[in-house]
């Protein structure tokens, strides 16, 4: 109920179907997030990847390679959920910038930025100056 009105919410399997469909859109920029959310939905709903209904949905809506991608991410999600300190993320009360500067080495951050941004963005090569 929301504001006295009954709201219908799709179950995890239907949400996974929507996310799989979204991953196939070549113009979509949040595909990485979609794959992470699919793994999270599978983990939260205790869905087994051997379930024939789930396999059929993955095959129909995820396309080639979707099952392999999901299997890889489910393993990573399970590891993170079994050990919540594995990622060592800041709490909502911690400022993000000081945490980032303390927890992430500059070389790692530079590698991430270079992978995310096209190299042509930089006018001159980055140096350690």
Image (cartoon, helix red, strand yellow):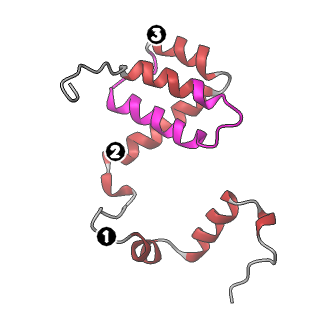
Work out which residue is located at the far left of the displayed protein and give it.
4
- For disc 3, the neighbor class at 10 Å (few under 14, some 14 to 19, many from 20) is few
- Between label 3 and label 1, give the one nearer the viewer: 1
| Residue lying at 57% horizontally and 42% vertically, measured from the top left | 32
Secondary structure of the residue carrying tag 3 is helix
The C terminus sits in image quarter: bottom right
Alpha carbons under labels 3 and 2: distance apart: 25 Å
Q: Is residue 93 left or right of residue 28?
A: left
> Which residue is tagged 3?
53
**In magenta stretch: residue 40:** yes
- Residue 51 in magenta stretch: no
| Circle number at residue 94 | 1
Disc 3 to disc 1, C-alpha distance: 42 Å
How packed mark 2 is, by other alpha carbons closer than 10 Å (few <14, some 14-19, many 20 or more), is some
Vertical placement of residue 99 versus 81, above or below:
below
Circle 1 SS class: loop
Q: Depth check: 66 or 82 in front? A: 66
- Would you name the residue on which mark 2 appears? 81
Task: Compute the Cα span from label 1 to label 2.
Answer: 21 Å
Q: Quadrant location of the N terminus? A: top left
Answer with mark 3 or mark 1, whichever residue precedes in sequence.
3
Q: Residues in magenta?
A: 21-50
Please state if 26 lies on the left or on the right of 82 as rendered.
Answer: right
Classify mark 2: helix, strand or loop: helix
């Amino acid at each position: 109920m929301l504001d006295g009105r009954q709201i219908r919410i799709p179950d995890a399997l239907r949400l996974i179907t929507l996310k799989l469909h979204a991953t196939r859109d070549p113009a979509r920029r949040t595909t990485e997030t979609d794959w992470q959310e699919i793994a999270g939905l599978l983990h939260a709903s205790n869905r087994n990847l051997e379930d024939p209904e789930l396999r059929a949905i993955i095959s129909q809506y995820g396309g080639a390679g979707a099952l392999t991608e999901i299997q890889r991410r489910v393993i990573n999600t399970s590891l993170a959920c079994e050990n919540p300190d594995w990622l060592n993320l800041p709490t909502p009360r911690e400022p993000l910038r000081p945490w980032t500067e303390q927890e992430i080495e500059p070389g790692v951050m530079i590698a991430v930025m270079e992978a995310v941004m096209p190299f042509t963005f930089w006018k001159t090569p980055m140096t350690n100056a």
